[in-house]
């Protein structure tokens, strides 16, 4: 006979912190993981840490722009090869 174990599991919604960094796009690499780690470990009271947090929205926009340029260039090169 099989014993059936049931647990009352209630789904818990936990508000996740939104990160400036995403895992989408072509720029997923060891370098990006290192940058994320250093960004998280930067001392909050140091001048470097404050400067990095101020620049972070700008880094996010630059990352998206760079990934878009890479995607468009890959598409264009594939389109040129297909036409030839």
Image (tube, rainbow, N blue to C red):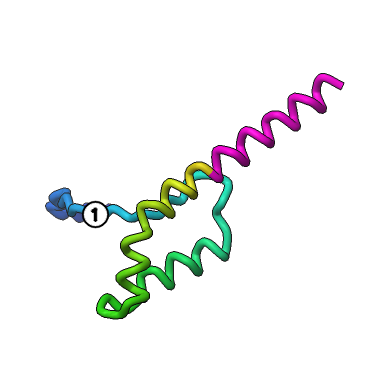
Inspect this view and state whether residue 1 appears.
Answer: no
By secondary structure, the bulk of the magenta-drawn segment is best described as helix
**Whether residue 30 is situated above or below residue 8 in the rendered picture:** below
Q: For the point 57% across and 64% down, which residue is it?
A: 30
Residue ID for mark 1 = 16
Q: Quadrant of residue 29?
A: bottom right
Quadrant where the C terminus sits is: top right
Q: Secondary structure at mark 1?
A: loop
- Magenta residues, as a range? 66-84
For this view, does 9 lie left or right of residue 69? left
In percent of width and height, residue 44 lies at: 27, 75
Q: For the point 52% across and 61% down, which residue is it?
A: 32
Q: Is residue 79 magenta?
A: yes
Q: For the point 35% across and 68% down, which residue is it?
A: 51
For this view, does 25 lie left or right of residue 17? right
Total numbered circles: 1
Q: Quadrant of residue 38?
A: bottom left
In percent of width and height, residue 78 lies at: 75, 30
Inspect this view and state whether residue 45 appears.
Answer: yes
In percent of width and height, residue 15 lies at: 19, 52
Q: Residues within 10 Å of mark 1 (few under 14, many from 20)?
A: few
**Whether residue 21 is situated above or below residue 78 in the rendered picture:** below
Of residue 66 and residue 5, the one placed in the foreground of this image is 66
Spot the residue most to the right. Answer: 84
For this view, does 78 lie left or right of residue 56? right
Q: Is residue 44 magenta?
A: no
In percent of width and height, residue 10 lies at: 13, 50
Of residue 41 and residue 49, the one placed in the foreground of this image is 49
């Amino acid at each position: 006979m099989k014993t059936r174990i049931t647990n009352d599991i209630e789904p818990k919604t936990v508000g996740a912190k939104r990160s400036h960094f995403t895992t989408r796009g072509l720029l997923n690499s060891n370098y990006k993981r290192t940058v994320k780690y250093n960004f998280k470990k930067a001392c909050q009271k140091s001048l470097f840490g404050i400067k990095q947090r101020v620049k972070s929205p700008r880094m996010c926009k630059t990352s998206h722009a760079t990934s878009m340029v890479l995607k468009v260039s890959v598409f264009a090169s594939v389109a040129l090869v297909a036409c030839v």
